[in-house]
Image (cartoon, rainbow, N blue to C red):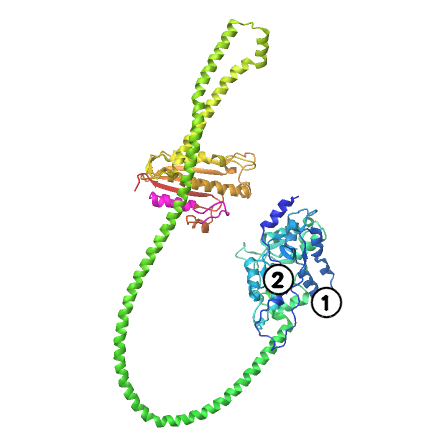
Amino acid sequence: MLQEEQLQHFLDSAPQLPVIKSSEPSEPAERPNSRPLYSSPLDRAIDRHPLTVAPETPIAHVLALMNPMRVSCQLCGEKQNALASAAKRSCVLVVEDNRPIGIFTERDIVKLTTVAACTVGLTIADVMTRSPITLKQSESQDIFTAMFTLRQHQIRHLPVVDEDSRLLGIITREAIHEALQPVNLLTNLRCAADVMTKEVISAPTTASALDLAQLMVKHRVSSVVIVEEPIQHPEQPIAPTQNYQIPIGIVTERDIVQFHALELNLSEIPAARAMSAPLFCISPADSLWSVHQSMQRHCVRRLVVVGSQGELLGVVSQTSLPQVFNQSEMYGTIELLQQAVDDRATQLQKANELLQQEILERQRAQEALRQAHDDLKKQVEERTAQLLESNELLRRDIIKRQKVEEVLRRKQTCLKNQAQQLEQTVRKLQQTQTQLVQTEKMSSLGQMIAGIAHEINNPVNFIYGNLSHASHYIKELIQLLELYQQHYPEPVSEIREAAAEMEVDFLVEDLSKLVSSMQVGTERIRQIVVSMRNFSRSDQSNIKLVDIHEGLETTLLILQHRLKPHGGHPPIQIIKEYGNLPQIECCAGQINQVFMNIIGNAIDALDEEIQKGEWARRNGENSPPSDPSSPLTLPTITIRTEVVGGDFVAIRISDNGRGIPEEIRRQLFDPFFTTKPVGKGTGLGLSISYHLIVEQHGGRLDCVSEAGRGTEFAIEIPILSCH
């Protein structure tokens, strides 16, 4: 059973999913001259009386308000009104001071069902979706703004508020469809295949109602089609792997909500009993008008589209159909079209009369043209001479314009080159800026580490230097004690009692071991201090001979706390396959920075996979359960070094995580690109690493990844510096 905090986290982590609801009957169409054909009034789509509750309302009371069981008791003649009432109860707004602070929908009831959460003692504030998306009525009076908001946020309920964020009503997709006017009268020319949903979630008859609810939540759908066992398509015997599903029933969110309202155990209800049957099916070639009539005849909201062999092709829902099927809307549209035809006929009659008059005038004008022909001929000859002269002037002007265009073309080319140079300069400035930010960060980190190492080094050296003297003094005291025991074997009773109480023999034996342990511990602290000093060279930019293995060991030592097991987190195994490398000329601080970025990213990737449970699911079947320390069951980072081509040193850092998709791998080295959540990554680590390896040291940095086989970063650095 989940606690209240876990239940709230589950509901808050998932976005509000769309819910399919039936529409209320649209209002009768107005008179033809009262409004235009393409009208979009926002007020008509607002439900002014939505269901509202206070935050402290118990969940049981909210479920009683949303209980859709009364719909099943309606007579066939009242089916449409019952569906409209059910659509009105599909969500509840949580208000405080008449301001919406949360929303609770049928999809949330399905979520509560799938997680088997105990709702006893909880209020609606514990399970509601907080801060719902709202629309201010003053922002736009266009209904298409509401449609865009619903589609953009993938929601089906949009509360409307005023300037003071006070609730005015709620808009749903069904209300928008009712408010819009019919604009497509050619539905008989369109078929079900044009509007059907092809991506249909299906389940076998052996699945339980709880499994169906989990499928709805996982795939964000409002219905699941129940199918028989897959069979081979009879028309394709050559491809035995091509199977088709035969639908036999359907289960919707409304069914799950009804089962939950009856307090039934969903895990014990099979799909064969939960589904609605018989199933009403249509062909993909059926017209939308016949689809609409079939829905009205059977009083259903969804029809299943099947092929010639009864195989499942898709689903057509009531919201997929245009709103022209409302008869009152169709009659209003027909009246508008009839009036437009009458107006057009009147205009054509007037145009015909004008045309008759124009013909008479043209006949008179034709006679006048004959008389003016001779005069026009003379004028043409004179005009031709003038045009020849103007043509010569125009030719000269064209030559001048061509010269000007050539000059402009050259200037445009010059400006284009300058723009490219400016773009390159801006890009270099951005890279320099990111490098300065990271360099300053690493410099501060190096100074801090150096200061800590210095402060630790002083007391450790003091302890380490005095341990040898303390060991010598203890040995002399033990020798003195042995001499006393040798020459005074029978001490007084008080000394014997004190020696027995102190356990002198054990004290002498354990004291030497204690001093040895202290010497080992102080030596370990000195090694850590030396490693911290070596890593603090990250702010040094001078090139010198560097041992790559020393930099790797220093980085691993600093990250050692992230490699150890803690809680249910297994340890991260480090496999070192070091080759025989010479010292190379490079900047030690920059190379250490690259190692820190790449190894740190590998640890982050493995941690994320372990925390999400993907590691256990992916490796649980491949690893022997009797050997928990097997390399297959442990997250592993492998570091390999070798000399490549005699001139380069290669460092390959790989992990056995889930890998990186190709679309993300292409952007890994882009500045400010990151897949980590806000606050855990800046997107500069790999970009700066690429800049340090490729541009600063003349090397190469590549990433090779395959889904399910991990990721490898290959670094190649020249042995002799090119700078």
Q: Which three-letter amino acid code belongs to the residue tagged 2?
A: Thr
The image position of residue 162, as x and y in percent, is 60, 61
Q: Residues within 10 Å of mark 2 (few under 14, many from 20)?
A: many
Quadrant for the N terminus, please: top right
Is residue 685 in the magenta section? yes
Amino acid tagged 1? Gly
Label 1 neighbourhood size at 10 Å, few (<14), some (14-19), many (20+)? few
- Identify which residue is drawn at 49% across, 43% down: 605
Q: Which residue is mark 2?
A: 172
Give the extent of the magenta segment. 673-702
Between 653 and 403, the residue placed more toward the observer is 403
Given residues 625 and 374, the one toward you in this image is 374
Q: Is residue 222 visible?
A: yes
Quarter where residue 76 is shown: bottom right
**Percent from the top left, x then y, of residue 331?**
63, 75
> Secondary structure beneath disc 2?
strand
Disc 1: which residue: 77
- N-terminal of the pair, mark 2 or mark 1, is 1
Quadrant for the C terminus, please: top left
31 is within the stretch colored magenta = no
Does 557 sit left or right of 33 as displayed? left
What is the distance, in whole Å, between disc 2 and disc 1 at their CAs?
25 Å
Determine which quarter of the picture holds residue 6.
top right
Which secondary structure lies at badge 1? helix
Tell me if residue 541 comes above or below residue 483 in the rendering.
below
